[in-house]
């Protein structure tokens, strides 16, 4: 399959989601060696899960398929430019490339505007809309110290 055909697959996932009223107009696929190994649709409202974006769902399925938490040598095709959360998930998954159709500006025009998240991330913690404050009890770093010493850890 060509890149254009993979993008059509991602867009078809998004359209099918809208047609079934299952969630937002977003779809994604993960491809490895010319084969689709993961599919995802926006299921935020269907699952009552704010993390159930198309890219995250496709990454989850692809990782299960590969039995790995990394998407080495994989490509992600998504119907829209990924949001900040999905960008984070994509970087953790480490695919070799991401391709998208619509832009975040296109998404904003239909009510899916995530610019406020980009804006919030640029602010210092004390200026953000949702307060974020450190609470550090005694041994607050014990899990980190234990991880550092562990001989059984799987690094990523």
Image (cartoon, rainbow, N blue to C red):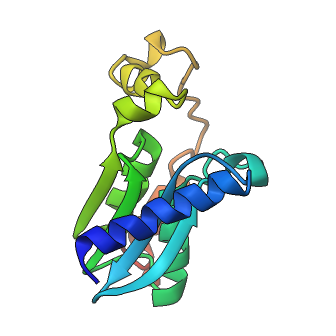
The part of the image, by quadrant, that contains residue 83 is: top left
Q: Position of residue 139 (x, y in %)?
A: 57, 47
Left or right: 19, with 60 as reference point: right
Compare residues 114 and 126 and report the one nearer the observer: 114
Query: Which x, y percent locates residue 51?
Result: 60, 50
- 68 over 13 or under it: above or below: below
Q: How many marks?
A: 0
Q: Quadrant of the C terminus?
A: bottom left
Is residue 80 visible to the viewer in this orientation of the structure? yes
Provide residue 4's location: percent of width, then percent of height.
Answer: 27, 68
Compared with residue 66, is residue 128 higher up or lower down, i.e. above or below? above
Q: Quadrant of residue 123?
A: top left
- Give how far across and how far down residue 13 sits, in percent: 54, 64
In depth, the one of 107 and 150 nearer the eye is 107
Front-most of residues 147 and 43: 43
Q: Is residue 143 visible?
A: no
Where 67 falls versus 48 (above or below)?
below
Residue at (41% x, 54% y) in the render: 79
Residue under the point 23% across and 65% down: 97
Up-down: is 153 above or below 117?
below
> Residue furthest toward the top?
127
Identify which residue is drawn at 32% across, 22% down.
122
Quadrant for the N terminus in the image: bottom left
The residue at the point 33 percent across, 51 percent down is 101
């Amino acid at each position: 399959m060509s890149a254009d055909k993979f993008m059509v697959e991602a867009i078809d996932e998004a359209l099918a989601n809208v047609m079934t009223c299952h969630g937002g107009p977003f779809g994604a696929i993960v491809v490895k060696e010319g084969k689709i190994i993961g599919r995802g649709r926006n299921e935020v409202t269907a699952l009552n899960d704010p993390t159930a974006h198309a890219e995250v769902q496709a990454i989850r399925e692809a990782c299960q398929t590969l039995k790995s938490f990394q998407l080495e040598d994989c490509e992600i095709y998504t119907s829209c430019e990924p949001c900040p959360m999905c960008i984070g998930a994509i970087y953790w998954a480490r695919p070799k490339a991401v391709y998208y159709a619509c832009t975040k500006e296109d998404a904003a025009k239909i009510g899916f505007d995530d610019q406020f998240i980009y804006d919030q991330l640029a602010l210092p913690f004390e200026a953000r809309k949702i307060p974020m404050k450190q609470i550090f009890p005694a041994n607050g770093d014990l899990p980190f110290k234990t991880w550092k010493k562990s001989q059984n850890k799987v690094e990523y």
